[in-house]
Image (cartoon, rainbow, N blue to C red):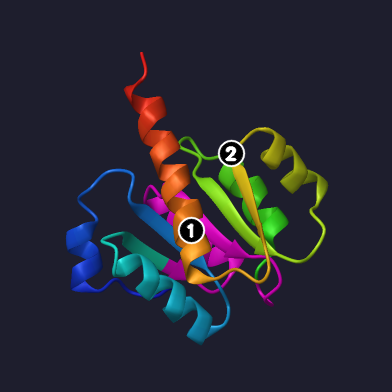
Amino acid sequence: MIDTLSPTARAAGARRHRCVLVVEANPAVRREIRNLFLARGFFVNSATRTADAVSLTDQDHYDVVVCDVQPPGIDATELTRALRGAREAPMIVVITTAPLSPVMEEAFRDGRLLILRRPVGPAILLAAVERVLAAFEAEARSP
């Protein structure tokens, strides 16, 4: 399932480096994470399955993908592999208690994967994404 965007999200989407894709199977958790970012002016889209997330990233640019490793229908290793091959690969923020696959470990070493260990509160998740975006902006400004 792919969620549709609210008018607020569409209006917020005009800013660069504020685009987040949430990949989460649980509707209540997905809604909570979406609302967290929407309330701070992010452009947010979401998917419930790996295939939907990959399809969305093929269609649009996302600066950050927030993914829960454990829900059914979501294969964080496959998602990481697919996103690392994208022309504008987003940063991936993984929320997990599980060990990382070799693909995810390599993405972590490359600096394209941030790991947040459960439990993760809204303030920690928001701060992690803000830090990633600030690093992208600083990198884009450097000669």
Magenta segment range?
46-73
Q: Residue at x 69, y 41 (%)?
A: 108
User: Residue 6: image x %, image y %?
Assistant: 25, 74
Q: Amino acid at mark 1?
A: Ser
75 vs 118, nearest the viewer: 118
Sequence-earlier tag: 1 or 2: 1
Q: Is residue 71 left or right of residue 141?
A: right
**Is 57 one of the magenta-colored residues?**
yes
Label 1 sits on residue: 55
**SS type, badge 2:** loop
119 vs 71, nearest the viewer: 119
Q: Residue at x 17, y 61 (%)?
A: 11
User: Residue 65: image x %, image y %?
Assistant: 50, 55
Q: CA–CA distance between discs 1 and 2?
A: 13 Å
Q: Is residue 1 visible?
A: no
Q: Amino acid at mark 2?
A: Gly
Q: Is residue 39 left or right of residue 127?
A: left
On the image, which quarter does residue 75 sit in? bottom right
Label 2 sits on residue: 85
Tag 1 near tag 2, CB within 8 Å: no
**SS type, badge 1:** helix
User: Circle 1: is it few (<14), some (14-19), or many (20+) Cα within 10 Å?
Assistant: few
- Furthest-front residue in view? 123
